[in-house]
Image (cartoon, coloured by chain):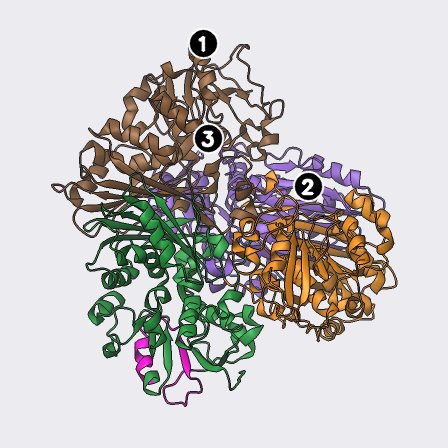
Chain colours: A green, B brown, C purple, D orange
Amino acid sequence: MRNDDKKVKVGVIGASGYTGAELLRILHVHPYVSVVEMFAYRSAGRKLSEVFPHLSTGYGGCELEAYSLERELRADFYFLCVPHGHSHEIVPFLLEKGKRVIDLSADYRLKDSSLFESIYGVKHTSAELLKEAVYGMPELFYRKIKGARLVANPGCLARAAILSLAPLLMNRLIEGDSMIVIDAKTGVSGAGRKIRDDLMFSEMNEDMRPYSPVFHRHVSEIEQVAGELSDKKPEILFVPHIISIDRGIITTCYIKLSRKNTFTEAKETFAEFYGKSPFIRILAPENLPSVKRIRGSNLVEIAIVKGKDENSLIIFTCLDNLVSGASGNAIHCFNIMNQFDEDTCLSAIIPLYP
Amino acid sequence: MRNDDKKVKVGVIGASGYTGAELLRILHVHPYVSVVEMFAYRSAGRKLSEVFPHLSTGYGGCELEAYSLERELRADFYFLCVPHGHSHEIVPFLLEKGKRVIDLSADYRLKDSSLFESIYGVKHTSAELLKEAVYGMPELFYRKIKGARLVANPGCLARAAILSLAPLLMNRLIEGDSMIVIDAKTGVSGAGRKIRDDLMFSEMNEDMRPYSPVFHRHVSEIEQVAGELSDKKPEILFVPHIISIDRGIITTCYIKLSRKNTFTEAKETFAEFYGKSPFIRILAPENLPSVKRIRGSNLVEIAIVKGKDENSLIIFTCLDNLVSGASGNAIHCFNIMNQFDEDTCLSAIIPLYP
Amino acid sequence: MRNDDKKVKVGVIGASGYTGAELLRILHVHPYVSVVEMFAYRSAGRKLSEVFPHLSTGYGGCELEAYSLERELRADFYFLCVPHGHSHEIVPFLLEKGKRVIDLSADYRLKDSSLFESIYGVKHTSAELLKEAVYGMPELFYRKIKGARLVANPGCLARAAILSLAPLLMNRLIEGDSMIVIDAKTGVSGAGRKIRDDLMFSEMNEDMRPYSPVFHRHVSEIEQVAGELSDKKPEILFVPHIISIDRGIITTCYIKLSRKNTFTEAKETFAEFYGKSPFIRILAPENLPSVKRIRGSNLVEIAIVKGKDENSLIIFTCLDNLVSGASGNAIHCFNIMNQFDEDTCLSAIIPLYP
Amino acid sequence: MRNDDKKVKVGVIGASGYTGAELLRILHVHPYVSVVEMFAYRSAGRKLSEVFPHLSTGYGGCELEAYSLERELRADFYFLCVPHGHSHEIVPFLLEKGKRVIDLSADYRLKDSSLFESIYGVKHTSAELLKEAVYGMPELFYRKIKGARLVANPGCLARAAILSLAPLLMNRLIEGDSMIVIDAKTGVSGAGRKIRDDLMFSEMNEDMRPYSPVFHRHVSEIEQVAGELSDKKPEILFVPHIISIDRGIITTCYIKLSRKNTFTEAKETFAEFYGKSPFIRILAPENLPSVKRIRGSNLVEIAIVKGKDENSLIIFTCLDNLVSGASGNAIHCFNIMNQFDEDTCLSAIIPLYP
């Protein structure tokens, strides 16, 4: 492992899934990071490049270690890329040792441990940390992230949906009792690296399908954040669809503005709200988002389109589920927590096109 | 050209686009059809198999002729697969000669010629026929189709959306002043065979993008039919997205039921309404549609899913844009007009999987 | 199950894999076939349409039974679509009962049982039938197939390669001691329906890779047939590559003609050799094969191209691995065995394009 | 435009094609480069990010200028990404002004101007520079590149093929009078950004096809370099195939070793020859290349596999046509010409997976 005293010493726990790989792809070009430890379960003992041959450059030569609570930890900062339901057993130990942590799993996203338990089917063993954990949306919670010991990185679909709603919610532009419809489309890598027969190439290629309508796991995240931003919890109808492409999310949000507000106000709200974000592009009129234009990068494209009447609105939000929807956003939070420029190393990750 | 006195003599005008090719693929196995004429503009003088090598079997050996109003017509029944804005100049002449016609273009779909003209930018020269033209939805207008001289085949996205709404509209199950959201996803062949730089493989592959939000051409069709089925025109918010697959449409409709109705009623309405349709599959609970399962066939998969409360509802409708969304449905209408079994030859067109 | 006394009563053993599904898709439109029995291992007890929802039309409503040697058999003709290494235990029993059989597995393709055993790692328990089994290439062994009790359907890559070589081998046009290079490209469905992590969508999509170079299982089939057609076994170098598309094979064969022969002779040989085949298209000069043009059909496109000198030659052969490379060819053999027209029902299976 | 006195001032001529875009994507992270000028023909006057929205980060805000020979040039080093047949009119002028040039077009690759003219159908107006131009293969011509004023960047397929052959040719391991077969597979972006109806998504998706067999433009490049490396020009049979993926090339080379040499020697030759290259990975036995593992990077995977006998050999070479096959390799040459570390900025361009 490379080391450099002036750099932040970083450890990655769960380096053999897609979010772990993506994290290491991007951290490789981070000027102030030295990844000094990588842990994996099944792949322990192998080189990273054996598990992910595309990482032969960069950290590929490093060996994946078996994680153990007993051993001494060499890093100061940890990214957890383990499956949902595993972080909550590791995080308390890391915090106790004085480490800072960004958890890419779902374990610390929901403030209500019983809600987590009913969704993920796992008893939460460190619920006392839920209050402290900061939900890692830099566009909303920059200051909290800056001072956090523990950041819960958002779910990919939740992040896209929240980016669509936040400016409207915070400024009370949404009609009070209206239903918010969120129709999401996601590439296949959003399902992670686990083996599933319905995701075999011959089954999935050239297909699209809805899945988990209404009760997808990310809905609770969206509702929780919406509740924090607004005075009352809006009613959300959320339906994701899986699409036979590798990467990319588009959420299409259908919204009813409150009667006293106009489309122009809504549009200006977005421009202002995201004006300082280094990654969010509010598209010009007549320009609509395209997954391929942001693929592989931390960029987010947002378009605001007027519905049929003055009070209906459509918000398109487009991002790469593995970057802005996972590892790129985690590094964004990391930069904030360490007082680096927000786009450090992320500005070097330009979309791959075509 | 093959001929057989007992068969219906069929002519195809505009045989060099995707809907023309698909029509000829399917008609090839129609036991009571003999295609005796094929016309094309730019490709006139070439064999069909030169324009569409995949049709080397079947009608591939036939020559495409230049269409002319002067020449004697050999067929009794015509399918028009010409671009929008061209049929209205041909159809009056065909009807005058005593032919029956199914028009796959948009020219006779809208009853209001000024609406047509504003959408398609073409002056309608046979608006007097709009009243007579029957909108070719066999599930709704079986009897009218049976007696029609002129059938206007629905737009692919319109057909999917109308199938989602019709049972609810006819039975007054939708809340009166609610907004109906229709989020549509379509494969690339829906854009036809014209050359467009944004649809080059390198630009389109692995991409998805919204297009023509709110004011897509098919919205007027949906609204017109909805108005006919119900006492009042519902408010519809329609947004299509193009997806990098060859074929397939999924429309996701978000609906508010009227307060006096229940989800169970809505579900039963679908089961009953489509009970006799040979092509529509109302999926069992927990089963959701998949484009790949219906690809290449005239089948339609519909799933009805309960929203968060008793009164919200999601309808998924899935069909192949070139078959049930175009040529297959046209042949369905043809079968009805000729009093053949509805599924004649269409039951032989089984989905291609994988 | 449908039945009709005038039709051939057919049974399918192993109906839950891709070749079984494809067989049932095509047999559905066979006018002289009634599928009266379907067997499966793990899926026994389920309806076919539960295992393959795309077959809801056709035989979808039929139940898959658990195969047992004890029970009485209702069919007269059996297709075996079981995995390699299982047919050899079933076939002797079927023949004994007076049934005719087409085996789509590899079990009866190779005449040399020890070669089979070394390749497939299974002891052959009915090696005495290997001599009787006819290799199911209708273009080469029409007469033998006609009179056969047991036909071994060729491997998909082997069939493509043999079609490329047969006219040259039979007419002694290949230079005696030259190496024949066969570079094959195949879609992913060629790997069958088994779960493999390297064939998950996220791993396979947008990829291509060579696999099993030199010693692929199909090489022995090619060599065996080449040896039968020619006086001496040619030296073959065979390398397959998997390509991220659903279906389709292209083999590119690089051949050295014997010095006394010319390119023109070679070309004429192909035209003559395949002149009567209902499925093989020898392409005109300047026209090269394309997988998409034959996808879903039993068609084969062959192009013969001159190398740099008078004596080198390239043969491109293109077919659908699941149709001409498996189930379609099996039905072709079935038609011959039952003295139906060769293209019965297969001429109705037109390629799906786009 | 950004500028920095310590950096090399770079100009890009022809910035609106795929190689131009890819060059700018990578140069964005080059620590010692400042792109001070960008020229384009049709897109002049527009911002780069309007032509390539994925480049909104980086050089996206810069304006494309119309190229003119009269105006003063601000850069010291020029990359030419113009179509074949245009560079030869620009380069003499640039050299005269004391600029150094890497030409990504074909204009200076072939030493024989009449050969160029017959292949590209254009009269070469600066043939006197052909002798001076260095063929930009860093693995072969490092020293010449280091001192060059004008580098001709190789064709993508040519580069892959030459990498496969060079170690064998230089060490005289190939049987003298044997035919070398090169079967190439390439993604669609290799065809560039021009509009072609056969490359529309609906025509190309899920397809594969051979094209330009035997006489592809890159053959002359391969033969020329092979002639330089070896005492005699080997006989090459080259056939490319286009595959429906965005990026990636695999060349499969079939080679006859001279009788006195062994497979082991051949393998060791590769290991030694490419031992110091920062981008070439000689794969371990049993590991075969995969396009997806190198996509978006300058990496090259090479596998050497034994044929059936001691003297036949298969070389697989895999690279990204737009990076190692074009812009990445050009930057590699640029680094050498400017005495930067060979992998400057290129080591930051890690493959995008999945």
Along the viewing direction, whichever of C274 and C339 lies nearer the viewer = C274
Quadrant hosting residue D314 = bottom right
Drawn side of residue A6 relative to residue D233, left or right: left
Chain letter of mark 1 equals B
Badge nearest the viewer, 1 or 3: 1
Chain letter of mark 2 equals C
Q: Which residue is drawn at 38% across and 59% down?
A: A274
Residue D247 position in % (x across, y down): 59, 55
Along the viewing direction, whichever of D301 and D87 lies nearer the viewer = D87
Along the viewing direction, whichever of D51 and B170 lies nearer the viewer = D51
- Provide the residue designation for mark 2: C303
The tally of labels here is 3
- Relative to C225, does residue A224 appear above or below in the rendering? below
Residue C8 position in % (x across, y down): 43, 37
Let me know if residue C114 appears in the view: no
Chain letter of mark 3 equals B
Mark 2 near mark 1, Cβ–Cβ under 8 Å?
A: no
Drawn side of residue C246 relative to residue B178, left or right: right
Disc 2 on helix, strand or loop? Answer: strand
Mark 3 neighbour density, 10 Å: few (under 14) some (14–19) many (20 or more)? many
Residue C193 position in % (x across, y down): 45, 55
What are the residue bounds of the magenta stretch? A66-93
- Provide the residue designation for mark 3: B26
Q: Which amino acid does label 3 sit on?
A: Ile
Which mark identifies residue B97? Answer: 1
Q: What residue type is labelled 2?
A: Ala
